[in-house]
Amino acid sequence: MQIGPYTLPEHDGAALFVAPMAGVTDRPFRQLCRRLGAGYAVSEMVTSRKDLWNSLKTSRRADHSGEPGPIAVQIAGTDAAMMAEAAAYNIARGAQIIDINMGCPAKKVCNKWAGSALMRNEPLALEIVEAVVAQCAPHGVPVTLKMRTGWSLEERNALRLARAFEAAGVAMLTIHGRTREQGYKGLAEYDTIAAVKAALRIPVVANGDIDSPEKARQVLDYTRADALMVGRAAQGRPWIFREIAHYLATGEHLAPPTVAEACAWLTEHLLDHYSLYGEASGVRSARKHIGWAVRGLPGGETFRQHMNTLESSDEQWRALRDWFDALAQTFERLPPAAAAAPDDATEALDAEACVA
Ligand SMILES: Cc1cc2nc3c(=O)[nH]c(=O)nc-3n(C[C@H](O)[C@H](O)[C@H](O)COP(=O)(O)O)c2cc1C
């Protein structure tokens, strides 16, 4: 699988990507996913608004130190010239691939006609793609794009847009099988993704509701996509990538990680997380990762509530390690997580995180 000059690792004909999730897929989390089988990771979105580039949030998002290549940065905005400038800004900071966001449904983004709202304004969407491609081409930087199936069921224009984007020089397309109107509700559909894949020569990535090795196999067989992208199912379970990779390659399930392995990965991730965010912000923002990691496990909810009262990284880190040590007294391997309640936080987090 190629994105411009970059070759990505494949498992039985498909590459595995971790989805960009603002507020989640920061550098430490991307590195964890890549270590556990994801072959590629796009960074969280960076706004095209220049006035926000000096904010702590944006400068953290544009920091790729120590990250394995290719470094892919997602940009979001509504104005073609500003988007081209954002591409140049990120290339100067190490981006090797620029990804355009036409998938985010958050209102604050949509009110400004960014994210998936751009799919409703096809001339503007194409103008943005052309401007970004023109900016990136002289640097040899491929431009990729992520979108939904359309604005609504009645306005599913992904195929028309995909053809136009390919003709404009886009090097890879990712499609989340939902419309803008669906947000994160309902089920992702894969017919549109299959139709786009059949019509295009550039690589197409299938995304939406891939939450198990079997589902990965089904989506791959149905869409014939070149890569699969996993978002929410990797939250707290980043080893899903190696489980999918193993299943695609062998048709058999990899045993769940041992509790000791999971503990080692997650506690190491915490240390990386604190070093990017610092003490106060690190402790606060680590809570969601810890909450996802213990979700559905025996005693996980009680632990999560206690952990949310801890205010120092040292206490938080030790509490997680001790909790896993206690779990290891009963289970050698991670037990299956009980079906967790739907994550109500998804949309709020997305809306909040998408802005800057
Ligand atoms: C918290 C959160 C933040 C997200 N942020 C972004 C983003 O910055 N850019 C983007 O293209 N998609 C974003 N998405 C959408 C995901 O990349 C992905 O398309 C979606 O979650 C569907 O895949 P999944 O079912 O595997 O989670 C976000 C999703 C979530 C849940």
Image (cartoon, rainbow, N blue to C red):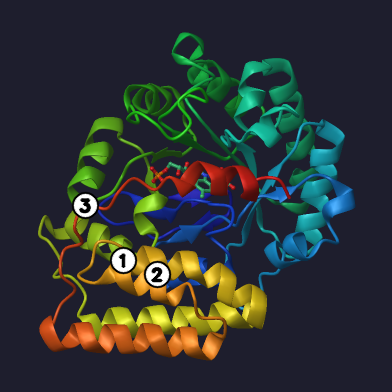
Q: Earlier in the sequence, mark 3 or mark 2?
A: 2
Q: Quadrant of residue 225?
A: top left
Q: Secondary structure at mark 3?
A: loop
Residue at 68% of width from left, 62% of height from top? 61
The residues tagged by marks 2 and 1 sit, at their Cα atoms, a distance apart of 6 Å
Answer above or below: position of 27 versus 262. above
Answer above or below: position of 99 versus 123. below
Farthest top residue? 154
Circle 2 crowding by C-alpha within 10 Å: few under 14, some 14–19, many from 20: few
The residues tagged by marks 3 and 2 sit, at their Cα atoms, a distance apart of 18 Å
Residue type (three-letter) at the residue carrying disc 3:
Ala
Tag shown at residue 339: 3
Answer above or below: position of 275 versus 40. below
Circle 1 crowding by C-alpha within 10 Å: few under 14, some 14–19, many from 20: some
Left or right, 226 with reference to 165: left
Q: Secondary structure at mark 1?
A: helix
The residues tagged by marks 3 and 1 sit, at their Cα atoms, a distance apart of 13 Å
Q: Which residue is mark 2?
A: 305
Left or right, 201 with reference to 224: right
Residue at 81% of width from left, 32% of height from top? 80
- Indicate which label's residue lies in the foreground, 3 or 1: 1
Residue type (three-letter) at the residue carrying disc 2:
Gln
Q: Secondary structure at mark 2?
A: helix
Q: Which residue is mark 1?
A: 301
Left or right, 168 with reference to 338: right
Give x and y (percent) for residue 24.
53, 59
